[in-house]
C-alpha cells in the first residue's frame, strides 16, 4: 500500500522584501529622483561635463530600476504564491477524495470477486442448498468479478 504524504507542521514562509532591503531600495529610488532633478538643471553645461554626469546617471538609473523591480516584483510574486497555495490546497483535497473513492472501489472489487467464488476457492466445496452455480445471479457475479479483476487484479488471494 502506498505511504500517505506527510503534512508540513509549519506553513511555508513567504518571500518578501523587508527591513534593510526596503530602505536601500527606497533610497536608490530617491537618489535617482534627486539625480534626475540635478540633471535637468545641468542642461546648459559643457559637453564634457554633461557626458560625465550622464554616465554616472546611467549607473544610478540601473540601480534605481533594479530597486523598483525588487519592490514591485515581490508584490506581484506574493499574489502568484498565494494563488499557487490555493491551487495546491484544492488539489490536495481532490486527491484525498479520490483516495477515499479508490479505497471504496477496491473494497467493492474484493467483495465482488469473493462473491463470484461463492466463498469457496475455485473447484472447492460448496454448502448444501447453495444456489445453482450456473444460475443468473451467478453469471452477474462472475461478470462483476471479471470486471473487478481487470481493473484491480486479483484481490482475493
Image (tube, rainbow, N blue to C red):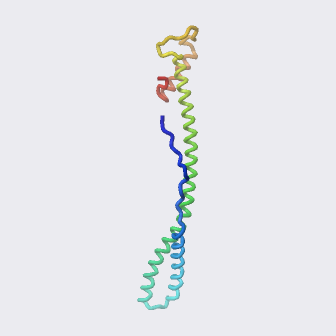
Instruction: Residue at 56%, 38% (x, y): give it.
Output: 98
The foreground one among 114 and 142 is 114
Instruction: Residue at 43%, 81% (x, y): give it.
Output: 55
Q: Position of residue 64 (x, y in %)?
A: 50, 74
Q: Position of residue 149 (x, y in %)?
A: 49, 26
Residue at the farthest left position: 48
Instruction: Residue at 51%, 40% (x, y): give it.
Output: 4
Location of residue 46 (image quadrant): bottom left
The foreground one among 143 and 65 is 65
Can you say whether 26 is above or below 147 in the image? below
Q: Position of residue 41 (x, y in %)?
A: 52, 88
So how many labels did they put on this image? 0
The foreground one among 32 and 137 is 32
Instruction: Residue at 58%, 17% (x, y): give it.
Output: 137
Can you say whether 138 is above or below 2 in the image? above
Q: Position of residue 37 (x, y in %)?
A: 54, 84
Residue at the farthest top position: 128
Can you say whether 104 is above or below 136 in the image? below
Can you say whether 86 is above or below 154 in the image? below
Amino acid at each position: 500500500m502506498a505511504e500517505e504524504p506527510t503534512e508540513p507542521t509549519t506553513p511555508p514562509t513567504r518571500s518578501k522584501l523587508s527591513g534593510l532591503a526596503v530602505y536601500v531600495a527606497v533610497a536608490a529610488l530617491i537618489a535617482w529622483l534627486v539625480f534626475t532633478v540635478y540633471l535637468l538643471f545641468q542642461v546648459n553645461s559643457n559637453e564634457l561635463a554633461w557626458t560625465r554626469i550622464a554616465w554616472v546617471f546611467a549607473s544610478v538609473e540601473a540601480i534605481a530600476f533594479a530597486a523598483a523591480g525588487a519592490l514591485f516584483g515581490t508584490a506581484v510574486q506574493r499574489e502568484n504564491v498565494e494563488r499557487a497555495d490555493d491551487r495546491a490546497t484544492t488539489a490536495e483535497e481532490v486527491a484525498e477524495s479520490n483516495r477515499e473513492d479508490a479505497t471504496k472501489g477496491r473494497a467493492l472489487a474484493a467483495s465482488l470477486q469473493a462473491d463470484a467464488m461463492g466463498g469457496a476457492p475455485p473447484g472447492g466445496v460448496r454448502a448444501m442448498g447453495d444456489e445453482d452455480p450456473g444460475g443468473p445471479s451467478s453469471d452477474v457475479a462472475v461478470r462483476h468479478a471479471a470486471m473487478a479483476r481487470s481493473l484491480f487484479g486479483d484481490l482475493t488471494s
